[in-house]
Image (spheres, rainbow, N blue to C red):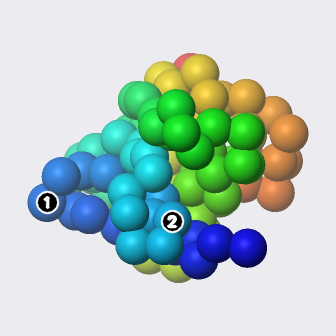
Amino acid sequence: MSNVQVVRIPENSRYEVHVDGEVAGYTEAKERDDGVVLFSHTVVDDEYEGQGLASKLVAGALDDIRERGRRIEVTCEYVEGFLEKHREYQDLVVDTA
């Protein structure tokens, strides 16, 4: 199995998933002044598709956000779908109603 890491890149407002040291994908995660992180887009490079990396990426990002005491707002379809399947992260979602 490859070495998979999720890395926060705050200067680029994103989290990256690295496979054996190479960037395999990212999720845009812009942190606002109010402590809410906006997830707007998730991408995994074609050569890495089908390995569950997007799920590992989002889970790693959400775990980091929880550890840092932040909340999330989501416009990314992939992250929305992930949250539907992984209800344990629902408490991080800001009520936008």
Q: Residue at x 73, y 29 (%)?
A: 81
User: Which residue: 58% across, 71% down?
Assistant: 4
Vertical comparison of 70 with 82: above or below: below
User: Which disc, if any, is residue 19?
Assistant: 2
Image spot of residue 77 (x, y percent):
59, 21
Count of labels in the image = 2
Q: Nearer the viewer, residue 12 or 65?
A: 12
> Which image quadrant for residue 10?
bottom left
Q: Amino acid at mark 1?
A: Glu
Q: Where does the C terminus fall, quadrant-wise?
A: top right
Q: Residues within 10 Å of mark 2 (few under 14, many from 20)?
A: some
Residue 11's disc is 1
Task: Say what secondary structure mark 1 lies in.
Answer: helix
**Closer to the camera, 64 or 94?**
64
Give the CA distance from mark 2 to mark 1: 21 Å
In this view, the residue in front, 81 or 57, is 57
Q: Can the viewer see residue 62 in this picture?
A: no
**Image quarter in which the N terminus is found:** bottom right
- For the point 32% across and 51% down, which residue is it? 14
Which sits in the foreground, 90 or 43? 43
Circles 2 and 1, Cβ within 8 Å, touching? The answer is no
Residue 50 can be seen, yes or no: yes
Q: Amino acid at mark 2?
A: Val
The answer to whether residue 28 is left or right of residue 4 is left
Seen in the image, is 43 located left or right of residue 29?
A: right
Decide: is 55 above or below 42.
below
Helix, strand or loop at disc 2?
strand
- Say which label, 2 or 1, has the lower sequence index: 1
Residue drawn 38% across the image and 63% down it = 22
